[in-house]
Amino acid sequence: MPLKSFREAINEALCQEMANDPSVILIGEDIAGGNGGVEGAAGSSGGMLGVTKGLYHDYGPERVIDTPISESAIVGAAAGAAMTGLRPVAELMFMDFFGVCFDQIYNQAAKFRYMFGGNCTTPMVVRGMVGAGFGSAAQHSQALWPIFSHIPGLKVVLPSSPHDAKGLMIQAIRDDDPVIFLEHKVLYDTKGEVPEEPYAIPFGEANITREGDDVTIVAFGRMVNFANEVADKLTGNISVEVLDPRTTSPLDTEVILESVKHTGRLVVVDEANPICNMASEVISLVATEALQYLKARPIKISAPHTPVPAAPNLETLYIPSKETIEKAVANLME
């Protein structure tokens, strides 16, 4: 099976779905490469970090559409296009800018099916970068999945590997509801085995990336990779099960509860700020539905309740670390 980067996996998913379905279009800032009026420039870059590179040449300006710098226009156009039969994939570049167009997302697209009695679907994907670790400072580095997960009518996807990125993107494009697809910017260059052929990963089905008997770690996004490294390091001393929900809405509560009932111990790692994040949700779920199975109190690991620092040394301290995860696991076993 070929090795591909996270970036290449998403690009391949977009390309294969555009080839498979002529109703799939891309819309966003510089996704065609920018400088469309300059001969030879269009399609040269494919967005800020090259995720859509080459697609302009394959599918042309009618399906890979550069837009002005207006998030409201991008998402509004995507929502309208979805209602009329297209399957748009809209890029917000940095997902931090969702505040500019949040009404179109949560008060319009997320509610169309409900408002029109099930007679209207909105098959649109809003994709963009999230997460700290890239030195992008407070306005470009946030972990925003808890906000989107709060909204009924939205499906929220947070892949942690190239394999999952491709399968989940294909599922997102084929889904008939609005999907928020969040790409951690630090993962773009990570590589993993990815099949050449198209495949879809169903939403709401968690992935157990490591099997274990002593402690369950539920981790989100980039933190799944941290948790896997900790589990591998502790092999032979502590048996750690790592669970990647892959989607925060829908959330695979059944697999989470099964794992905790098996191990009796729980660590939840979420890069998002601590108040009302997904770690809080998972611990609440376990405390409500599986309290009697716990052998120790659950441990929540999150970023502090501050903006993401610009200084590299402070940003490193801000992000939950592998050392913190390992210490939490050890504490549960005492």
Image: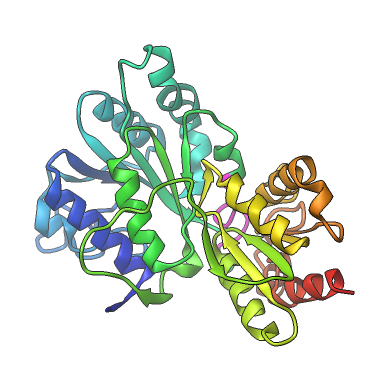
Up the image or down, 334 lies above or below 112; here it is: below
Q: Nearer the viewer, residue 112 or 68?
A: 112
Instruction: Judge left or right: residue 33 versus residue 62.
Output: right
Q: Nearer the viewer, residue 17 or 56?
A: 17
Up the image or down, 48 lies above or below 74; here it is: below
Residue 275 visible? The answer is no
* Residue that sits furthest to the bottom in the current view: 236
Q: Position of residue 116 (x, y in %)?
A: 37, 12
Magenta run includes residue 266: no
Q: Position of residue 184 (x, y in %)?
A: 49, 61
Instruction: Judge left or right: residue 136 versus residue 188.
Output: right
Residue drawn 59% across the image and 52% down it: 255
Q: Position of residue 125 (x, y in %)?
A: 35, 41
Q: Position of residue 204 (x, y in %)?
A: 48, 46
Colour basis: rainbow
The number of callouts visible is 0
Which region shows up in magenta? Answer: 134-145
Tell me the chief SS of the magenta region: loop
Instruction: Judge left or right: residue 65 versus residue 112.
Output: left
Residue drawn 42% across the image and 13% down it: 115
The picture quadrant where one finds residue 188 is: bottom left
